[in-house]
């Protein structure tokens, strides 16, 4: 299942709102242990309908599948994603949490959970979602990126830079982290560092529309 895109789901709305989050350094415990399931299986046709954008049909098949598999974490995850595609972010978050409680604790799920809490302006829960994900897998790049955004809105430039750099260290192709890192460097009057990050983005994705425009602006400084 695709992860939520920061750009597609209103990142610029998300980052424009100040994050009033307290206790950002507290430890977050992993979700309660559940019996392991060797292989998660969802309804293939429901997933194909979701990929094709036939949301109503996909939701109906996922819900039908859940009647016989009520604690199938993968299906709960996909159902939440489908609700999110419809714009029902409360149900999206609800089913993501159900999926985690059912034992489906994958990186993309925790990332999407943090994203949807951002959509709902429940910023402390967004922070916790990224931390919960790192408790499961401390090497997942996007969770560090999400935490970097939170610290950015708190005005903590040192922590913001550190988290973005960690995201890039773990995944050099994390283009969102590189883009926002370049923004930090511009604010710090570090033009060459900003240019380096933008050029790295274009080396990976030559058609990246934001980076191409940003490069023009930086070169004119």
Image (cartoon, rainbow, N blue to C red):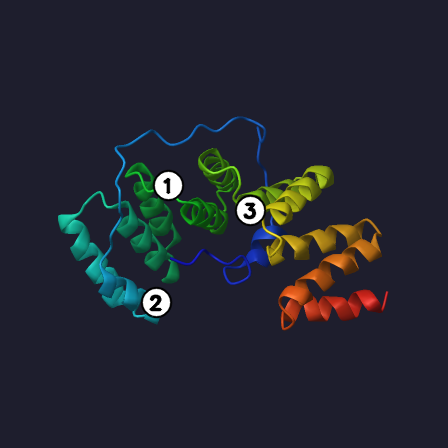
| Residue ID for mark 1 | 105
- Residue 185 is left or right of residue 162, and the answer is right
Examine the rendered structure and indicate whether residue 128 appears above or below residue 90: above
Residue 10, horizontal then vertical, whole percent: 53, 59
Quarter of the image where the C terminus is located: bottom right
Of the two numbered discs 2 and 1 on the same chain, state the one appearing first in sequence.
2
Where disc 2 sits, the SS reads helix
- Residue 217 is left or right of residue 59, and the answer is right
Of the two numbered discs 2 and 3 on the same chain, state the one appearing first in sequence.
2
CA distance separating discs 2 and 1: 22 Å
Within 10 Å of disc 2 (Cα), the crowding (few <14, some 14-19, many 20+) is some
Where disc 1 sits, the SS reads loop
**Total number of numbered discs in the rendering:** 3
Q: Nearer the viewer, residue 219 or 168?
A: 168
Q: Specify the quadrant of the image occupied by residue 192.
A: bottom right
| Residue ID for mark 3 | 141
């Amino acid at each position: 299942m695709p992860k939520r895109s920061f750009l597609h789901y209103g990142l610029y709305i998300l980052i424009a709102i100040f994050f009033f989050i307290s206790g950002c350094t507290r430890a977050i415990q992993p979700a309660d242990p559940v019996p392991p399931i060797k292989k998660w299986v969802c309804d293939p046709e429901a997933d194909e309908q979701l990929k094709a954008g036939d949301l109503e049909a996909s939701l109906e098949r996922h819900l039908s599948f859940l009647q016989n598999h009520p604690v199938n974490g993968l299906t709960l995850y996909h159902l939440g994603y489908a609700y999110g595609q419809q714009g029902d972010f409360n149900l999206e978050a609800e089913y993501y949490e159900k999926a985690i409680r059912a034992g489906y604790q994958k990186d993309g799920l925790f990332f999407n959970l943090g994203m949807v809490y951002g959509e709902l302006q429940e910023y402390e829960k967004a922070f916790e979602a990224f931390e919960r994900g790192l408790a499961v897998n401390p090497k997942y790049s996007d969770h560090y990126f999400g935490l970097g955004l939170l610290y950015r809105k708190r005005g903590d430039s040192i922590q913001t830079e550190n988290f973005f750099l960690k995201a890039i260290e773990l995944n050099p192709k994390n283009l969102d982290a590189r883009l926002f890192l370049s923004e930090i460097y511009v604010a710090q009057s570090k033009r060459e560092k900003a240019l380096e990050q933008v050029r790295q983005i274009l080396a990976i994705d030559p058609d990246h529309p934001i980076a191409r425009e940003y490069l023009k602006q930086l070169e004119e400084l």
